[in-house]
Structures are given as C-alpha cells and as structure tokens.
Amino acid sequence: MFYKTVKFFLKPLFDFLFYVRIEGLENLPKQNGYIVCGNHARAIDPILIGVNLPQKVHFIAKSELFKNKVMGFVVSRLGAFPVKRGEADLKSIKTSLRLLQNKQNIGIFPEGTRNLSGELKAEPGIAMLAVRSKCPVVPVSIKTNYKLFRRTNIIVGETIKMEEYFDAKLKNEDYIKISLEIMKIIREL
C-alpha cells in the first residue's frame, strides 16, 4: 500500500517537473518475474523508472542508504533491498533470486554505481542474476539532462532472454561480457 501511495503522488509530480515521456511499455513481459536494468547517472533514476512502470520493481540499492534509519525505513518500505558494492554480496543475491522466483520484479543498474563519465562499464551481477534465475531482462534507457521542466524520455526496450547461457559453465569474465552487451543495448535505445 505504501508503494502505491508514494507512486500515486510522485508520478504526476515527476511528470510535471521532468516532462516524462515513456515509450515501449508494450515490451514489458506479460507476467511478473523480470529484471529491469537501466543506465544510471543520477540518484533519482530508480524513482523515474519505478513510478513510470506499471508493476512494482524492487530495486537493489547501495547499503549506505540503509544506514540512516529514516532513509532505510522508507526505501525498504518501497521494496528496495541493500547490496554491498564491490563484493559478491550473497545476501543480496539470495534476496534477488527469491524475489524473482516469487514472480516479483527487481531493478538493477549494471554499472554498479552512478556513471557520470558515459564510459561503457558493467558489473557481472545483472548477467549472473538473469542466468541463474532464468528470468528475462528488460533494458530501460533514461535520456535526460535532469533539468527541471525539460523533456525526459524513458525508453523500455525489447526483452532480452538468456536461454543460450542457462546450461553453460560461465566465469566472472563471461558474466561481465554479457553485462556489457546489455549495457550496449541500453545505450542504443
């Protein structure tokens, strides 16, 4: 209920402040249990994506957000869960896989942090989660200059399926390569 209430108030506010236009909603899978991944330049990116997609998305958020009790409470109530960046966080991986198995959607930014340089980079997490969960990936591109009253385009791309990797023995380097390919698709949207 908290998620829907916050979304109800934030969507019109963000639509007004950032002139949000969303394209490609027809590309979303019909059933829940998918991974939303997008480019990440500013802290408001998860909000822009979350309020504009019809289904709830549980975002993987940096663990530092949860250290402040008020912020931690709010983002937890919105469905976010923490990840310790720079390491293989087993608790975050298990939470992600459990949510996907229970037909919930998760959101992840493959770059691992905000990317202000525009350099193409990706962590292995998105590919590893997609392969292990056998869930589709939904690429989302945010195109904006983040200035108030300027157009913001959110483009939902065609679903990426990973069947070719389901039975493969993959190493960390393979996951990074697959994640980079996903980031290329996001950039091309």
Image (cartoon, grey):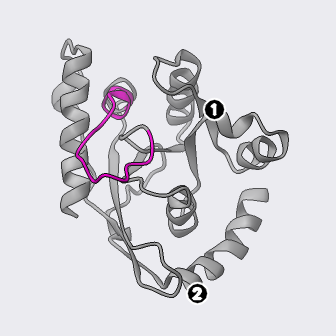
The quadrant in which residue 112 appears is top left
Q: Which mark is residue 16?
A: 2
Position of the C terminus by quadrant: bottom left
Relative side of 98 to 108, left or right: right
Q: Is residue 36 visible?
A: yes
Amino acid type at circle 2 is Phe
Relative side of 2 to 27, left or right: right
Relative side of 80 to 49, left or right: right
Position of the N terminus by quadrant: bottom right
Q: Is residue 162 visible?
A: no
Rendered view: 27 above or below 76: below
Rendered view: 33 above or below 138: above
Percent coordinates x, y for residue 89 in the rendering:
52, 19
Amino acid type at circle 1 is Ser
Residue at 50 percent of width and 23 percent of height: 93
Q: Which mark is residue 24?
A: none
Say which of 63 and 21 sits in front: 63
Q: Main secondary structure of the magenta part?
A: loop
Rendered view: 36 above or below 152: above
Residue most toward the right?
Answer: 70
Percent coordinates x, y for residue 26 in the rendering:
34, 69
Residue most toward the front?
Answer: 117
Read off the residue under disc 1: 63
Say which of 34 and 156 sits in front: 156
* Mark 2 and mark 1 residues within 8 Å of each other at the beta carbon: no
Q: Residues within 10 Å of mark 2 (few under 14, many from 20)?
A: some
Q: How far is mark 2 from mark 1, CA to CA?
A: 30 Å
* The magenta stretch spans residue 120: yes
Q: Secondary structure at mark 1?
A: helix
User: Sequence order check: which comes first, mark 2 or mark 1?
Assistant: 2
* The magenta stretch spans residue 49: no
Write the start and end of the magenta stretch as one range: 113-129
